[in-house]
Image (cartoon, rainbow, N blue to C red):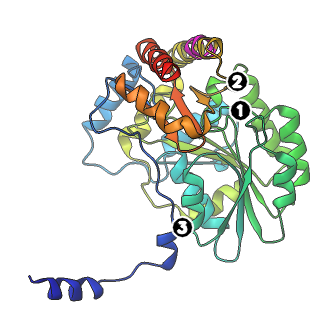
Amino acid sequence: MNTIHAAAERSALPRPRDLVASLPVYSKAGGQLPPTWRASSNESFLHPSRAVLDAIDTAAKHCQQYPTLQGDHLTAALSRGLGVAAEQIVAGAGSLAVLQQLLTAFAGPGTEVVFAWRSYEAYPILVRQTGARDVQVPLGPDHRHDLAAMAEAVTDTTAALILCSPNNPTGTVLGAEELAEILARIPAHVVVVLDQAYVEFTDDAEASSQHSLALLGAHPNLVILRTFSKAYGLAGLRAGYMVAHPDLAAHVRAVSPPFGLNAIAEAAAVAAFDDTEALAANVSTVQEGRATLHNALAARGLALPDSGGNFLWLPVGESASALEAACLAHSVSVRSFAGEGVRVTVGSRAAEAAVLRSVDSWLAA
């Protein structure tokens, strides 16, 4: 095919919606060669427990069959474990997929979605896919949500407001009083999404979990998002869920694809949710590593916020790319946000040691 014909054929291809060109690209760790240690994706470096692996094996033997229509087995397990009605739960292929369905149900052209920035980088992608406008409210100087500014950003056209706690990538956590205050300020027509993907790693995880669930009764516009990708170690299988008022959950269920949670992921999630000992061990390992790495970095003169996640945020500004390169030179991948900082996943002692060697070489350069 000559160049003229190729150009003509390309010009005749179907054109996507204009908004596709505006979508930001989800970042990935730099480097050309696979690193020895991955500290870039907030994955668990620990393998799933025997109970989870057995559940995966059993489910895989029946993969010729469709999964449950709406993650029914996982919904039932969550209902029992969390003490909420099954009608309040929507399960899906990760909390990201559930958030996409939530925004599909409630946002769209002519509406706005407010969230802090920097926060989870998928938010603007999902919001713009709906045709809504994303309103990014800068974090405060302490790397925390500026809740007053976020409340001020809400208008009659705001469809949703997203709170990420612990915030990705800064790790900062919203306290109980802060949540109560922001919820009291947000109008009833606005869906308030509390993204708790990392809640299990907070120092008071059980209290935080129960407190946020208790808020649902007084705030029917609140939606809580959680995932099995982080503390439960199932990032490769994709399972997550939301908890909300039954009416809101029904609207999200209406736009969710049937059989959206595959059978292997569902079986693994149910087993992981029930295996509380494995969860506790994983969380303890992360918390220990987080404290040790935080103290070691602080001793080297780096000012970083306290984190409630399985990661630390190094706000090194314009040096972010240089620090990432130093880490790659020591065979450890991290997540760099150009001009802002570097996020480092904790959990693996070997990876944490490599990060410290990287920081030392970067500081000495």
The residue located at (38%, 21%) in the rendering is 47
Location of mark 2 (residue): 306
Name the amino acid type tagged 3.
Answer: Gln
Q: Which image quadrant for residue 204?
A: top right
Q: Are marks 1 and 2 in contact (CB under 8 Å)?
A: yes
Of labels 1 and 3, the one closer to you: 1
Location of mark 1 (residue): 172
The residue located at (64%, 59%) in the rendering is 250
Q: Is residue 153 left or right of residue 43?
A: right
Name the amino acid type tagged 1.
Answer: Thr
Q: CA distance from mark 1 to mark 3?
A: 27 Å
Residue 157, placed above or below residue 267: below
Q: Is residue 293 highlighted in magenta?
A: yes
**Viewer-nearest residue: 265 or 352:** 352
User: Crowding at label 1, few (<14), some or many (≥20) Cα neighbours within 10 Å?
Assistant: many
In primary-sequence order, the first of circles 3 and 2 is: 3
Location of mark 3 (residue): 129
Could one spot residue 247 in this view of the protein? no
**Viewer-nearest residue: 136 or 132:** 136
* Mark 3 secondary-structure assignment: helix
